[in-house]
């Protein structure tokens, strides 16, 4: 399961409206190879639900995760920061043994 903080929920809803997305479009969270630590997070809007997707809902936000990515993301919290130390979505992942300085890549 992936949890969403109130700040992340608010930013997702704001972006959904600003970019003209419909209610049928959900958040897709996935993991792919790359980055300085070996694995990278990918976050996007998606209206397609694949056969191997797991669907979670937290605070009214539907999150799609493919089964392969779910192995790396179980227990992750999606947050949003707009502070001086960086602006953007952040993944608080208890499965990550190492993360890079930018927070966009990790290793297990």
Image: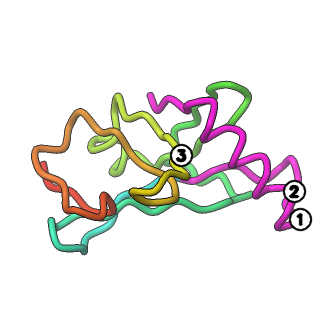
Q: Nearer the viewer, residue 3 or 5?
A: 5
Mark 3, other Cα within 10 Å: few <14 / some 14–19 / many ≥20: many
Establish if 4 lies above or below 70.
above
Residue 26 is covered by the magenta coloring: yes
Q: Position of residue 92 (x, y in %)?
A: 34, 39
Which residue position is annotated with label 3? 80
User: Which quarter of the figure has residue 7?
Assistant: top right
Establish if 93 lies above or below 42.
above
Tag of residue 17: 2
Q: Secondary structure at mark 2?
A: helix
Q: Secondary structure at mark 3?
A: strand
Q: Secondary structure at mark 1?
A: loop
Mark 2, other Cα within 10 Å: few <14 / some 14–19 / many ≥20: few
Q: Quadrant of the N terminus?
A: top left
Q: Please give left or right for residue 19 compared with residue 34 in the image.
A: right
Which residue position is annotated with label 1? 20
Q: Please give left or right for residue 14 compared with residue 41 in the image.
A: right
Residue at 78%, 46% (x, y): give it: 13
Marks 2 and 1 sit apart, C-alpha to C-alpha, by 5 Å
Q: Position of residue 49 (x, y in %)?
A: 65, 52
User: Which quarter of the figure has residue 105?
Assistant: bottom left
Residue at 67%, 60% (x, y): give it: 45
Q: Position of residue 84 (x, y in %)?
A: 45, 57
User: In this picture, which residue range is highlighted in magenta?
Assistant: 1-28
Q: Earlier in the sequence, mark 1 or mark 3?
A: 1
Residue at 76%, 58% (x, y): give it: 15
Labels 2 & 1 near each other (Cβ < 8 A): yes
Q: Please give left or right for residue 77 compared with residue 33 in the image.
A: right
């Amino acid at each position: 399961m992936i949890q969403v903080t109130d700040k992340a929920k608010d930013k997702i809803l704001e972006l959904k409206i600003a970019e003209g997305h419909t209610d049928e479009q959900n958040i897709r969270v996935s993991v792919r190879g790359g980055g300085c630590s070996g694995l990278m997070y990918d976050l996007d809007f998606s209206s397609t639900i694949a056969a191997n997707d797991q669907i979670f809902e937290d605070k009214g936000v539907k999150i799609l995760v493919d089964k392969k990515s779910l192995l790396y993301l179980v227990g992750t919290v999606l947050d949003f920061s707009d502070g001086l130390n960086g602006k953007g979505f952040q993944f608080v992942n208890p499965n990550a043994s190492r993360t890079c300085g930018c927070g966009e890549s990790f290793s297990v």
